[in-house]
Image (cartoon, helix red, strand yellow):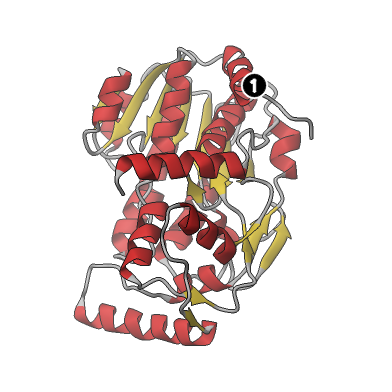
Amino acid sequence: MPRFSEKSWQSGLLKGFDVKKAVVTGGGGFIGLAVVRLLVSAGVETSVVCRGRYPELERLGVEHLQGDIRDRVFLDKAFKEADTVFHVAAKAGIWGNWDDYYSINVIGTGNVISSCLDNQVASLVYTSTPSVVFDRRDIEGGDERLPYATRFLCHYAHTKVIAEQAVLAANSDRLRTTALRPHLVWGPFDTNLIPRLVERARSGSLKQVGDGRNRVDISYIDNVATAHILAAENLNTKGTAAGKPYFISQGEPVNLWDWINELFHRLDIPGIRKKVPFRVANMAGMVLEKLYSITGATSEPVMTRFLAEQLAKSHWFSIENASRDFGYFPAVSTSEGVDRLVEWVRSSGI
């Protein structure tokens, strides 16, 4: 693939982006905020639906609609006159109450679909996850033909399967829909993955799970946001992405533990030296899950079976379909992304 200037390429992308009004649910979160920034830079009238208040959104000057996606009346008002909706809001994590995950990820998504239809929204881009196909086996180079998982180790993955299926089933001449599955999203302003890794590393509680040979996909935040814009543009024009899911990543899987250790080296954090066999971590996760369920603990266990699987198994995917259907490619390389991340971590005082 030829080398491109990210700035000039992104400028060309946004210049051709023909959306009059967009609504981003979960626009105060990591991915949602990155999508909002791109929309604002393209001059798109943008509204954000989220439950909290976010100073960054106010600085961007977007319409800030505070409410809950489980409130259908609220959504109907929020989506009025919008032509494109980016549904990023979700309850993430690997531990919690089923009812909470179901009400937000399934009922909330159903409300988004219904409100889009009632407000004549033309296109809906849904932020999904590769966890919808992770079925406790290594995945190496898989594509969108992989079946949905049927054995779930966390409510997040289970409810995201139901929600993604609903979004794709809703695709029609009235509402074009697509689902993006970005994998391990990272970069500046990350509020989850990188801060947690850094915290556990500095406390000495982070251990390598498994033999350390597993390869995984990673996704730089700006590339993920750009994929959302490209998908929306496609839905509003050619429509070749309509009704389909897509894996999004850097397109080059990394050895998980080597990548983490290299990042730590750049941040002057000691590398991971402690190791635990997968079977031991998996058993520990099972025991902790039972204890937390019995005691009713609401905090996240330090280990679960889902986390053990994710840390020890390979899971990387082809991005060929996203490239073919709506021109996605990782404009920001992994090395450049790491440079930006290191600079941000140092300046932010994480």
- Give the camera-side residue of 3 and 74: 3
Estimate the x, y position of residue 201 in percent, counting from the top left: 38, 65
In the image, residue 173 sits, relative to residue 304, either above or below, namely above
Of all residues, the one furthest to the right in this rendering is: 1
Of all residues, the one furthest to the front in this rendering is: 268
Estimate the x, y position of residue 45 in percent, counting from the top left: 40, 14
Residue depicted at 38% across the width and 54% down the height: 92
For label 1, the crowd category at 10 Å Cα-Cα, with few meaning under 14, some 14 to 19 and many 20 or more, is few
Residue depicted at 50% across the width and 74% down the height: 208
Hey, which quadrant is residue 136 in on the image?
Answer: bottom right
Q: Where is mark 1, residue-wise?
A: 9
Hey, which quadrant is residue 78 in on the image?
Answer: top left
Which image quadrant: the N terminus? top right
Kindly identify the amino acid type of the residue bearing the numbered disc 1: Trp
Residue depicted at 20% across the width and 80% down the height: 295
Residue depicted at 44% across the width and 87% down the height: 283
Estimate the x, y position of residue 150 in percent, counting from the top left: 56, 69
